[in-house]
Image: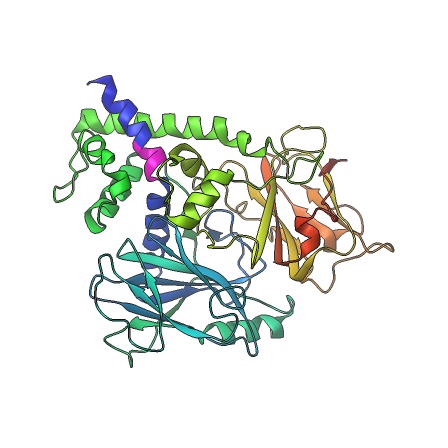
Amino acid sequence: MDPLVRSRAVQAVIWGMPAVNFELLREAAAGVGAGDNQVVYWSRLPDWKNQTLTPNPDILYFFPFYNTQAGPVVLEIPAAEGGSITGSVDNGWQEALEDVGPAGVDQGKGAKYLILPPGFDGDVPDGYIAMPSVTYTGFGALRANIASSKDADVAAAVEYGKRIKCYPLSAPDQPTGFVDAVDVVYDSTIPYDLRFFELLHRFVQREPWLQRDRVMISVLKSIGIEKGTPFTPDDELRAVLAAAAAEAHDWLDANYPRFYTAPYFDGTHWAVPASPEVLQGMQSGFADPDSYPVDDRGLLYSFIYFSAKHLGQGQFYVMAIADRDGAPLDGGASYRLQVPADPPVSLYWSATVYDRGTHALIRILPYASRSSHRPDLATNPDGSVDIYIGPAVPEDKESNWIPTKSDGQFEVLFRFYGPEPALFDKSWALTDIEKL
C-alpha cells in the first residue's frame, strides 16, 4: 500500500484527537444509559472507575450531553444559592462556547443558556443567553463544588447539581434525565488502534465540516473515511491504520515533555500543560488566520478533555511529570510535595496522581488525591502541608498520602479552584516534588 496512506493516517490521529476524545466521552455516556440531552453525574466523589483523562476526584461531575440536530437545546444553570457550579459548555471539538456559574456569564445568578445548532438563523427568545455551536453535539463539563469531603457536604452538592436542567427548546416541560455513573467503569482513554478511526468516522458522519478543516476531506478519504460513505477498510488497510495509530501514539508520547520546558513557577518543573497558542485558539475557535497549532492540540487532547472560555477565572492548573532533579516520576519511589502556607484559592486546592501511560487515575487504588477539602489533612505549624506520594504509606502520614503502583510512571496535576491574584503575580509559588 502507498506509504502516503500511513503518514496521512498518523496525521488524522493528531488532527482528530479532540473530536475522538469527545466521541469517547459520548460513547461512555451511552454505555451507562444516558441519551442526548441527558446528564451523566457522579453521586459520590469519583474513584479509579472514572477512567476519563486526568479527572478531578475531589469534585462532583455533571456532564449534560446536548444534541441540537432537532433544534436548539436549553441548559439551565441554577443560581449559586446553597451551592455553586464551576464549568464550561464545549462543542464537539471541545472548544468552549462559554463558561457558566459564578465564574461564567451568569456570574452565579443562574441562567437559561440556549445552545444553537450550526447555521441557526432563527430568533433567540427573550430571557436566554445564546450559545452558537459549530457542531450539533457537545457537552458541559460542570462541577458541583463541595464544602468538604464529608458525606453531608457531598450529598448537598449532589442535590444542588441535580437542579441543572437540559431539554430541547421545543419541549420545555420535558424532565431532565440524570444517570449515575459512580459504580461503573466510565472509560474514555484514547485507543491507539483501529477503533480510533471508527470513532473518527462516526464524528465525521454526524458533524459539519468547518472551513478551517476542509483540507482534511481528501486526507481522510484516502484512509477510508468519507462523509456519506460506510467505513469498510479491507484487511490491508486495517493493518496500516493500526500501525499508524501506534506510530501516532509514539510521536505523542515522545513530544509530551515539551509542554513542561517553560515552568510556570521559576526554577521548578510545574508547568501549564498546554502551549499559549493552543489555549488562545481553543478559546476563539482558532479564529487567528495565521495560527492553527494542530500538533499541540493533538498532544493536549491525548491527556485532557474539555476547555474553558476564560482560563484562570474559575480554575487554574499546573502539572508535573518530573521531580526536583528532573527525573520522571516513578511509581516505585517515594516523594514529598510541600504546599506552602496560604494557597491562593477562594474555594480549594488539590493534588492528583495519574497513570503516565493512560493519563487516567491509576486503576484499583483506593484514592488518587489529597485536597484542602479533607477534614483530616494534617497541616504543619507554619501552615504548609506535606503531601506524600509513593507505593507505601509513610508512618503516621496516611491522611496526607497518595498511593502509586510500582510498575509504571505517574504525573501530578495541581488544581486551584477560585484562583486568587498571588497565583498569577507569582508572589506564591508551588515547590517541586522531592524524591525521598
Q: Is residue 297 above or below residue 79?
A: above
- Split into 4 quadrants, where in the image is the N terminus? top left
**Magenta stretch contains residue 328:** no
Identify which residue, 124 or 40, lies in the foreground.
124
Span colored in magenta? 12-16
Horizontal side of 230 relative to 329 (left or right) equals: left
Horizontal side of 401 relative to 54 (left or right) equals: right
Q: Is residue 42 above or below residue 306?
A: below
- Split into 4 quadrants, where in the image is the C terminus? top right
Q: Position of residue 320 (x, y in %)?
A: 62, 38
Identify which residue, 60 or 80, lies in the foreground.
80
Residue 390: image quadrant is top right
Horizontal side of 102 relative to 385 (left or right) equals: left
Identify which residue, 362 or 104, lies in the foreground.
104
Residue 294: image quadrant is top left
The reply to whether residue 362 is visible in this rendering is: yes
Q: Position of residue 162 (x, y in %)?
A: 45, 74
Which residue: 66% across, 28% down? 327
Which residue: 19% across, 32% down? 218
Residue 347: image quadrant is bottom right
Most extreme residue toward the bottom is 173
The reply to whether residue 303 is visible in this rendering is: no
Q: Position of residue 144 (x, y in %)?
A: 52, 67
